[in-house]
Image: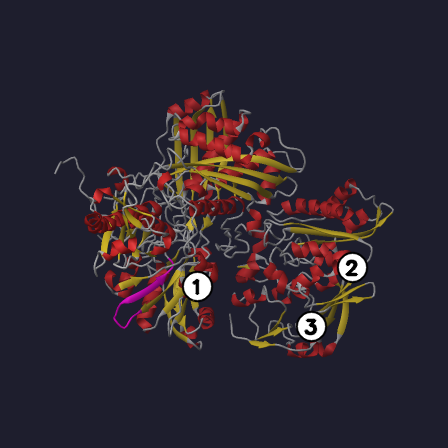
Amino acid sequence: MAKNAWPPADKTVLMGKRIARLDGPAKSTGRAKYAYDMNRPGMLYARLLSSPHAAAKVTAINLDEAKKVPGVVGAWAEIATAEPDNEVRYAGEIIASVAATSEEAAREALTKIQVQYQVLPHLVDDTDATKSDGREQGEDKPDAAAVDAAISGAEVKVSGKYGLACITHACHESHGQVCEFGADGNLYVWPSTQNVSAYAGGLKDASGLAVNQIFVDCQYMGGGFGSKFDSGRWGAISVRISKETGKPVKLMLERDQELLIGGNRPSAYADVTVGATKDGTISVWSSNAWGSGGMGGAGRLGVPYVFTKIPNVRTLSKGVRTNRRGAVAWRAPGHPQACLITMAAIADLAAELKMDELEFFLKNVALTDRPEVYTEELKIAADMIGYKDKAHLRSNPTPGTLKRGLGIGIHTWGGIGNDSQTEVVINPDGAVSVSIGTQDLGVGTRTAVAIVAAETLGLPLDKVQANIGKNSYPPSGASGGSTTIGGVSASTRDASTIALNALLEKVAPVLGVTVDELEARDGKIQVAATPSKSLPWAKACSLLGQMPISGRGENKRGKGVSDGTILDDQGVGGVQIADVSVDVETGQVFINEFVAVQDCGRIVDLLTAESQVYGALIMGVTYALYEECIYDNITGRMLNADLEFYRLATLADVGKLKVHMMTGPGYDTRGVIGLGEPPVIAPGAAISNAVANAIGVRVPTLPLTPEKVLAALEQGGKLA
Amino acid sequence: MDSETPAFVFPCKHIRSKEMYYQSSTDENDPFSSGMFWCARTHESFGPDGEPVERVECKADRRCFEE
Amino acid sequence: MNAFEYAMPKSIDEAISLLSETPGESQVMAGGTDLVTALKQGIVSPKRVVSLRHIDELKSIEASGDGLRIGAMATLDDLAAHDGVKAGAASIVTAIKGIGSQQITSIGTIGGDLCQLPRDWYFRLGFGLVAQYEGKDLVAEGDNRYHAIFGNDGPAKFVNASVLAPALIALGAKASVVGSGGAKREIALEELFHAPKKSEDGNTTLASNEIVTHILLPLGARKNALYHVKPRHGLDWPIVSAAVAFENDGGKAKNARGGLGHVAPMPWVSASAAKALEGAALDEDTAAKVGAAAAEGASPLSRNAYKVHLTKVAVKRAILAAMA
């Protein structure tokens, strides 16, 4: 009988190998259809009008002229014009909608809508908590006199201000969906979502249907990063318009709206004091942090990050309510912020001690939850980047105007598998279908599902059809918290094993052995001890007669650990080291090399795992050097809601990226662990530390723009 | 019921967090949970009354609360 | 975007006849790399767009006297690949390569680059070239990190977006302009630009029914180079650029000219820098001194003083590159 637990890593045929995405050709040829590509007969194009004011009350909306534009089918107010529900709280907030037979007509109609606003005072600047007009929220943890004593008693200490600007998800595929009411009265939806199985719940009220009448289909999607769980107001509005007009509707956010209202990663700033003994052991941490998640909460900020066993710790934290779109989970919510603030302060402490940064990190790994992992990863990362040859103390910069430096960041994440169910059907002709209501955000989930099923059934990959992206398939959790790969791998392994065992029941008597003696391998069902005794897969499946068999597998959070199968697991560490050059005359930062060493337990597909890390490094370079939602204090508007001044790194900017996945004993003997967030946590910290090492002074906040680098050099008396 | 056990308070039915969509149980103190919430009515991080959506904030004394 | 007529004239005269005398009514389109976005965003809402893409005589690059006569519709790629440009105007090649986008350089044109609208974010949000909001000068009181450090004493504080103008000005280029009734005029390139007093005045000195037809670029044995500071290696616009051209007269600069980009509402000609370079020994010390001279008279706004520093550096590096 086949067992649920993973086979040993050295016995696998597919799992852990480098396997290209199954849908790569479809994506690169354009055959893959994204939500934006869906077109239905008679479809209307809907567009949304955003508020130009950050704080206002809407007193009147006139849609008459918009309705007169040729091709316009309807226009609707999306906010009340009377108290108390007529308040606008951020620029970009949705005010009205239009639907037309062409995109052009819809856009023109938006310009004809007349809205009267009573403008109110706003606050968009979150960089200075003392100027927040009493908009702070959050409770300070009680003061600890022991911390004051530890600070004054510390043999070495540094104080600094660190922070990161608010950024947005900037999904390449904007938020939205195509929807259509069928003749059967059901609602069919093609959204861009990271939440296929539960997406329909958000459309229940707008459609007036029960969730079982809403059919969701998302085969491909172009980036979510945490911002595509909710169907959004745009989702509800498009369903309402479709219901009212009786036409299919496409509503995708325009690029400026995507940047304005698609989602915000909260800013975080902190005044930090950190101390150590003379030999370089961190002894005390004190921080006073603030940040803004728009008009909602700012989320969690867990500092000190990773070094959670520092003996004396005081953390104060508050959120500042600003007139911006609210915080939306962005890959590893709170972690990139906590990582930058912690690693920067700690690297400054190492510099103050005139101690090598790597040596300092190694010395203090005892203050983390996984000292062995970090030690091993730090050493590998250092070797990969040539640390020994390149490293220098911050006080001893390289000559010339192009200064070179190294910087380290380390991170952690949970990544336990999500709640997930898979159904595996083995047909009498040997064809295998795997169905699961998960989604592939572009990272290779579809491929991973197929790999696990094929590995379990002993089949080549092309014999398995992986069906994902529909809520009519068995429910599988949304892709958040790096929980997808653990969840889908566990439920797919479980389902495949159950289905296989049903097949083995048929095969055992034919081969004259017990079920326990059989295994599926190399396209055969064979006796494990005497592989020559076997049936080819198709022949074995013919024993099913005319009826397919199926297995329904399930994962529940924590099941892989509690039931001893260790199909999934949680808790990873990663180390990143950046090698940068900084032009100290222009303030430009250039990435030379960037190394990531990452563990994620048992690897399903080494190629897509590495690819996930490469992507994270690119996203990390982007927020370290370029990204920032720039708001205008006078008008309250976002000044760079475009991809021109909201800069994303191009390939020319990311330098040479090197990825090393931890494998072998202690790693692939663990369960499968998610990889979506961990590698994107440390880049800001590593790059900021590398810049500090290069130029001899800390640039306090990300992004590290020429303007800020020059200002830091000037303040440090180091401007050339 | 043990008198020490506080009565279970149903949160507002419109509160949402991403964690609700991928695990059947949530741990408030999980360092890997986002601590970010939205309202299913407004699809914003603030409720219909303009106040922030938070597990502890979305309670019966708000005009928009629904059990 | 509003509905508009799209005209595709085959000749310069036909193009002129299709343009309105009233500003804003018609809009000339060259490569369209920026105009299409501006149309979609409602930054411009003309009744008619007049494309110059079908006028063949505007596309050629021809030898003329000691230089080149470049059609306004010559693409940036054509320009960068032209042997005469490569040999005599390295600064132009640097500027084009610096754009970092094959998509833009393959369809974008020299005329479009020169006449393009500013990328100032207040302008792009619809507040006008002279960005005002409730009686406030948005640039002066707002986020001016990318704005003008020279020529900003008037109401306009955006920076000219042309990447080619500084190099063309340094090389002494002229613009050939045709207007109403086929009237032709030839102007020094720097005269093509102005800082408007009112938003409606536009960022060039062209009448609404005038077009730039050709650029006359003198080529000679001049050292020339351009240096720009861009945030990204890939597609991006310079924060500051500096172009220089001079003859090497026995180790000394002669007939020195220069142009600064992205520092003023128009490409900026620094008389103090040219004066400092003229007759000076071609060495590092001179490069630094000329850089400092270029920054003279700068009037940075609340948060763009770093651009003054970048100007010094860009000028110094442009001179060093030209010397090399």
Tell me which corner region of the image, top left, top right, bottom left or bottom right, holds residue A26.
bottom left
Q: Do the residues labelled 2 and 3 touch (CB within 8 Å)?
A: no
Q: Distance between the residues labelled 2 and 3?
A: 22 Å
Front disc: 3 or 1: 1
Q: Where residue A562 appears, x then y in whole percent?
A: 25, 38
Tell me which corner region of the image, top left, top right, bottom left or bottom right, holds residue C280.
top right
Q: Are marks 2 and 1 in contact (CB under 8 Å)?
A: no
Q: How far apart are marks 3 and 1 (CA)?
A: 46 Å
Above or below A452: residue A110: below
Amino acid type at circle 2 is Gly
Front disc: 2 or 1: 1
Q: Tell me the residue that label 2 is attached to.
A: C172
**Is A369 or A95 nearer to us in this picture?**
A369
Magenta run includes residue B8:
no
Q: Which chain carries label 2?
A: C
Categorize mark 1 by other alpha carbons within 10 Å: few (<14), some (14-19), many (20+): few
Q: What stretch is highlighted in magenta?
A: A181-192
Identify the secondary structure beneath mark 1: loop
Amino acid type at circle 1 is Arg
**Is C204 or C217 nearer to us in this picture?**
C217
Q: Tell me the residue that label 3 is attached to.
A: C210
Q: Are marks 2 and 1 on the same chain?
A: no
Which residue is located at x 58 percent, y 39 percent?
Answer: A580
Q: Do labels 2 and 3 share a chain?
A: yes
Specify the label residue A31 is tagged with.
1
Above or below A250: residue A91: above
Q: Mark 1 lies on which chain?
A: A
Q: Where residue B65 appears, x then y in whole percent?
A: 25, 52
Q: Where residue A101 appears, x then y in whole percent?
A: 41, 74
